[in-house]
Amino acid sequence: MYTGTSNRVFPLKGIKPIEVLQAIEALLAERQVKIEYGKTWQGWGENNELSFKEGDLVESDFKIFALGGGSWKVTGSDGSWLSAFADKGIETIPFQASNCAYTIDWDEDFMARHEGAPLKNVAISCGRKTQKGEAVITKQGMEGNAIYALSPIIRQRLKQGQSATIYIDFKTTMPEGRVFSKLKRSHDQKVSDSLKNDLKLSTTQIALLKAYLSKEEFLEKDKLAQKIKAFPLEVIGASEIDAAISTVGGISLSEVDENFRLKAYPQQYCIGEMLDWDAPTGGYLLQACFSMGYGLAEHLNGE
């Protein structure tokens, strides 16, 4: 492995994902970890054993649940386990889509020309939250890391029956005054040419401005500069849970202690996406889940 400039750890170049998986499997086999496939957990037995649909009752010193969220049913992550915990008297919260695409009622002419186009090096804001990154224009709306991180506030506003207005900054490294100055001093007679040559906006960014701004806003340089730095779009919905990268909801955090132990049930633990917390991207979600597993293992090793 090697550590990148961001302090993140990566496999050495040339190593394929399957090789990483095989190395993990080899380590598990060396430590005599047994993995049972084709088993469906359905709750607890009379004596608190783990009960499986196939008729097995399994007792253990520790029980660690890492059952995932409610998205991507094709992988088995359907959240159906939620009812078993609710029946046990454990507080659960219904799953909602997070880190997902958001719906925008696009102008038809704009969409016909720019579906699938990226918006690179932008910053998207909603309320007091701003996230730099990239986004992709899709037929349904918009997705990408620049909007995923805004999921909590967008979700809250949609839940309250409101639309959520997001604002896109197309020139994150340039203050509004400088944007205006460049537009004012441009030698190009056409505004579109000024945006392309002086501000280096992409074809898609220029098309967005032309499609959604009034003639006055597009032609008056001070107003255009304002919109380039804070271009408004209305989000009217979120994608379905099964199309989301991850979900929020699951076991309430009030049900576990600092070591992820279920307070009402000794030696039983819940970790990962099945807990009710929200990650800003799929990558951070994975890392946090891995960290929970590591932290719990360290805790149990000292028990």
Image (tube, rainbow, N blue to C red):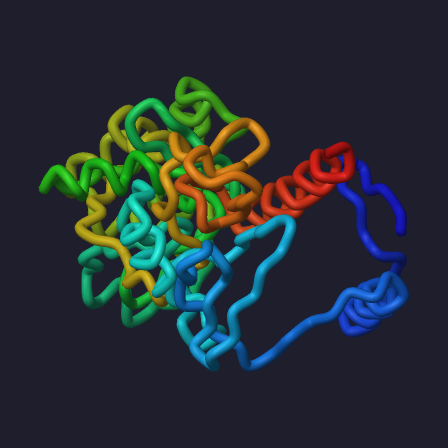
Residue at x 21% of width, y 59% of height: 106
Q: Looking at the picture, tell me which residue is in the foreground, 277 or 214.
A: 277
Residue 180 rendering spot, x and y as whole percentages: 38, 24
Q: Position of residue 237 (x, y in %)?
A: 20, 53
Q: Out of 145 and 54, give the one closest to the viewer.
A: 54
Q: Is residue 160 above or below residue 29?
A: above
Q: Quadrant of the C terminus?
A: top right
- Specify the farthest residue to the left: 161
Q: Is residue 193 above or below residue 17?
A: above
In the depicted structure, whether residue 125 falls above or below residue 14:
above
183 and 4: which one is in front? 4
Splitting the image into 4 quarters, where does residue 298 fall?
Answer: top right
Relative side of 18 to 244, left or right:
right
Q: Is residue 198 visible?
A: no
Q: Please, which residue is most extreme toward the front here?
A: 47
Residue 279 seen in the figure: yes
What percent of the width, then of the height, locates residue 3?
85, 42
x and y percent of residue 282 in the render?
53, 51
Q: Residue at x 44, y 44 (%)?
A: 275
Circle count: 0
Res 104 → quadrant:
bottom left
